[in-house]
Amino acid sequence: MISQPVGTFGPPSRAPAGWYPDPHGSAYARYYDGYRWTPYVAFPDHVGAEPQPAERPHPELPIPIAIGAIVILAASLIASQELLDALIDRDWNIVVYMAIAVAVGYGPSIAWMWYASRQWGTGRVFSDLGVRFRWVDLGWGPLIWVSTVAAMGIVIGLMRFLDVPYRGNLDVDNGSPFERDNTSIAALLVAAVIFAPIVEEALFRGAMLRGLLSKMAAVWAIVLQAVLFGAAHFDPDFGRESIGLIIALSVAGAGFGLASYLLRRLGPVIIAHAVMNAVAITVALNS
């Protein structure tokens, strides 16, 4: 068994892969892969455990990161909706409302992920959350998108058969400013195809899923973050039709969660998420 006091130095030279006291000084153990420190942390009772197999462990983060992400996101989304309702009569350009929604709805969550990485992780937020890309992700992303959309299509068809109320969150009414204002369309595309996939995947499949994995089995962690992903897209203006929307997007969250768990990084699901939003917006604006 190999152990050492917590400090600023790595494990002994040529130490086997395993869990060691965190060299960054946190209360958690950190995984050493035999060559370098990884962003994976666990509770201190992992210290001195038998060396792990060559395959990397599934990434986990301390549970406070997931809990904080859930609470902060819920509070900020509610605040965003209340603020927009209060400002809706000012007749501002739709781009202004979108900027407010993004800043208030996701700004606090971005700040939390940054803080959590410094408090419990390595301080490298992208590494801790798994925001990494490889060239092969250009193939994985569309494949994940096709698989996820197929699953959503089956579920939506079943909901229609059972008469479950459903309305897509990107349904655009005739006469919408998005159909007339090129600036608004460009802003929507930037928000939905670039900003949302990166932030939402880092939040749900990064902070939430990896935090939940430290406390529960993978299947339950994937299901829980998927339901939270669906619920985060709840629109009170849809009324009962939000039921079907939450179910459909929970299926998408489950597909993205499973893919990120198996591939151990977020690059492929960020691409899949971006493709899904881009196709949905294109269909909505041309319908």
Image: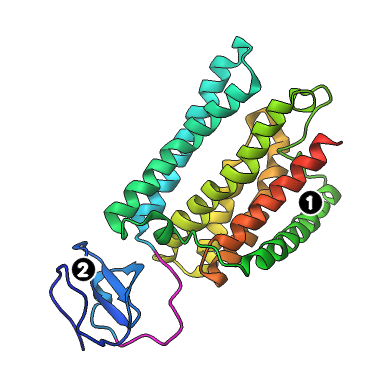
Quote the CA–CA distance across marks 1 and 2.
49 Å
Q: Is residue 153 visible?
A: yes
Does 52 lie within the magenta span? yes
Picture disc at residue 23:
2
Query: What is the crowding at mark 2: few (fewer than 14 residues within 10 Å), some, or many (at least 20)?
Result: some
Please give left or right for residue 60 compared with residue 2 in the image. Answer: right
Could you say which quadrant of the image residue 71 lies in? top left
Q: Main secondary structure of the magenta part?
A: loop
How many marks the image carries: the answer is: 2
Q: Position of residue 39 (x, y in %)?
A: 36, 66
Query: What is the crowding at mark 1: few (fewer than 14 residues within 10 Å), some, or many (at least 20)?
Result: many
Q: Amino acid at mark 1?
A: Ile
Q: Residue at x 56, y 67 (%)?
A: 134
Q: Amino acid at mark 2?
A: Pro
Q: Which residues are magenta?
A: 50-60
Picture disc at residue 156:
1
Q: Are marks 1 and 2 in contact (CB under 8 Å)?
A: no
Could you say which quadrant of the image residue 145 lies in? bottom right
Secondary element at image label 1: helix
Secondary element at image label 2: loop
Q: Nearer the viewer, residue 210 or 7?
A: 7
Q: Residue at x 61, y 59 (%)?
A: 269
Q: Position of residue 164 (x, y in %)?
A: 78, 44
Q: Is 52 drawn above or below residue 142 in the view shown?
A: below
Looking at the rendered image, the quarter that the C terminus falls into is: top right
Picture disc at residue 67:
none
Looking at the rendered image, the quarter that the N terminus falls into is: bottom left
Q: Residue at x 83, y 53 (%)?
A: 157
For marks 1 and 2 on the same chain, the one whose residue lies earlier in the sequence: 2
Q: Position of residue 36 (x, y in %)?
A: 32, 76
